[in-house]
Amino acid sequence: IENLVCSDIQRVFRIKTNSARGGFVRNVFFRNAWVEAASGELIDLKTDYGKEVGTFYPEIRNIHLTNVFADKARTAIQLKGTPEIPMNEVSLTNIQVNSAERPNVIKNVNELETRNTQLG
């Protein structure tokens, strides 16, 4: 996914799953996004979406976001794995959010790499 220009959006990048949905998301490359304003989380990955609970543990692995620029967002980054379903190998490179209303949320992420990242 590359070369996005957005004005007012809710999120620029989102992956949501839970143990009732299962499956996997691997080897995703997202780069070059310019956003004026995000009313939600600019970047949102979670393995605890919704209220469903099951035994199909999903996998989120090898996710790379590069060159994402936003003037403002409610929250810049939300990465929410659970102890049972952590995320693995997430990299954030050249991410810049000038202003964020709420703090970032990062839980249960193994091998998180950040480079040149400024989050409001």
Image (cartoon, grey):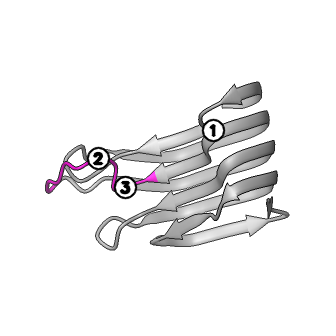
The three-letter code of the residue at mark 3 reads Thr
Give the Cα separation between the discs numbered 1 and 3. 21 Å
Report the residue that reaches farthest toward the left: 54
Q: Nearer the viewer, mark 1 or mark 3?
A: 1
Mark 1 surroundings: few (<14), some (14-19) or many (≥20) residues within 10 A: some
**Does residue 116 appear to the left or right of 82 in the view shown?**
right
Three-letter code for the amino acid on which mark 2 is drawn = Gly
Q: Is residue 97 visible?
A: no
Q: Which residue is mark 3?
A: 47
* Amino acid under disc 1: Ser
Q: Write down the residue under mark 2.
A: 50
CA distance for labels 1 and 2: 20 Å
User: How much space separates mark 2 and mark 3, taking CA atoms?
Assistant: 9 Å
Chain part drawn in magenta: 46-55
User: What kind of element bears circle 1?
Assistant: strand
Compare residues 93 and 7 and report the one nearer the observer. Answer: 7
Q: Pick whichever, 41 or 30, lies toward us.
A: 41
Q: Position of residue 35 (x, y in %)?
A: 78, 34
Residue 50 among magenta residues = yes
**Mark closest to the chain's N terminus, 1 or 2:** 1
Residue at 46%, 61% in the rendered image: 80
Q: Which mark is residue 39?
A: 1
Q: In the rendered view, would you say 7 is above or below 95?
A: above
Give x and y (percent) for residue 1.
66, 31
In front: label 2 or label 3: 2
